[in-house]
Image (cartoon, helix red, strand yellow):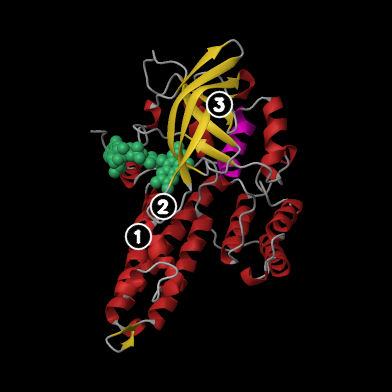
Amino acid sequence: MDFDYTSTEQSFRQEVKDFLAANLPPKSERDKNFLTNWLEKVRAKGWVGFSWPKAFGGSDGGLIEQAILKEEMALAKAPPLGTSMMGLAWVGPGIMEYGTEEQKQRFIPDILDSKVTWCTGYSEPNHGSDLAAIQCKAELVGDNYVVNGQKIWTTGAPWSQWIILLVRTDFDVQSKHDGITCLLVPMDAPGVEVRPIENMAGDKHFAEIFFTDVQVPLENRLGAEGDGWKVTVSALANERSSIGEVTQMYEKLDKLKNLVQNTRKQGKPASEDPGVRRTIARFEMKIAAMKYNGLRFLTKQIKGEPLTSETSINKLHRASLEIEMDDFAVELNGEAGLQLRGGEQAVDQGTWSKSALNWPNVVIGGGTPNIQRNIIAERLLGQPKD
Ligand SMILES: Cc1cc2nc3c(=O)[nH]c(=O)nc-3n(C[C@H](O)[C@H](O)[C@H](O)COP(=O)(O)OP(=O)(O)OC[C@H]3O[C@@H](n4cnc5c(N)ncnc54)[C@H](O)[C@@H]3O)c2cc1C
């Protein structure tokens, strides 16, 4: 692995830094037009869908440049490069790979221009980890699929305009991975009912969605009927070297280091306590492990080898590390550490306790730790299935 950046890569990093210095004011100075202007500017730079082919409005950007872009954006705590995280991460790439010409023309520009937000309708009340067991059904009647069933935990559903939806079109199948179809459904279609769910941190980011006789035109099917599993698996494999996430973890560690310097333990700054110091050092080593794993994945991608099961390593690692860091910060401050924003003694405006309450976001969202362990054991370590 070569850790040195070429001069072209270094000048790209400088270009991103200069752009950020010129266009990212401190949060307190951002007015109501800031986000719209920001989105227009990053779009004009060609940084939205940076690695997408030029033919689809992307920049054909290289993987290292993309990692640099993500790293610098995360370091500067910049807003996202588009309003539809899922649109950019897998709906767009899925449409580019499996969509019809008409679908490409219709959906891709709006994702890049932040005109629409997408959500992902995979999980159902009884089928989360075992995704292929989905029961939400669609029946082709004339030129429309008629969808009936329920989805749950759909992040962004309360404000999204479109959903990428997995439905079962055939119940009489040998393997549960067959008979699944992927549909692109407008959230304002008659018969779609969104009921937001409040999580324990008080946020309403996700929802359950009920589909009652929802008519979805045949032209909104992504890929062939029965190919939904293939479409989903390949779409989800996009952009997963986790380099941007590592930068966020380093940011979090810096915040934690600040916290221990400013917290008193037995009459002294907690940062002088040997136990606290050991814990901080352990976190730092774990983040470094995540970083070098991320670089290994990036190297693999650069060699043209697709990423598959190995991304489960960082997903699992990050989940437990985030919880450890949040819990440590909360415990360090005793009762005050538990207070949320607005609490009289809230620490760092309650961000640690809020993050501790939001642990399911990183732990369960996108697949539980047990599922990641199964993937690592079976597919990477070659352990038997039972
Ligand atoms: C914050 C958040 C956001 C989410 N966003 C979305 C979204 O946008 N779209 C979407 O479709 N879904 C979303 N989900 C749903 C998420 O993908 C599922 O919750 C997750 O896959 C787990 O499924 P489940 O809830 O049905 O739990 P289950 O699958 O019932 O799992 C329950 C427990 O059993 C364990 N388990 C299950 N199967 C096995 C096995 N084979 N081996 C060992 N242990 C097993 C699990 O690890 C877990 O501990 C979100 C969830 C959260 C928490």
User: Tag 2: residue type?
Assistant: Val
Q: Earlier in the sequence, mark 3 or mark 2?
A: 3
Say how many tags the image has: 3
Dot 3 alpha-carbon crowd within 10 angstroms: few under 14, some 14 to 19, many 20 or more: many
Quarter holding residue 318: bottom left
| Residue sticking out furthest to the left | 386
The residue beneath circle 3 is: 183
The residue beneath circle 1 is: 323
- Which residue is at 57% across, 20% downward? 215
- The answer to whether the residues at label 2 and label 1 have Cβ atoms under 8 Å apart is yes
Q: Secondary structure at mark 1?
A: helix
Please indicate whether residue 376 sits to the left or right of residue 16 in the image: left
Q: Nearer the viewer, residue 156 or 377?
A: 156
Instruction: Tell me the quadrant of the picture where the C terminus can be found.
Output: top left
**What stretch of residues is rendered in magenta?**
86-98
User: Tag 1: residue type?
Assistant: Ile
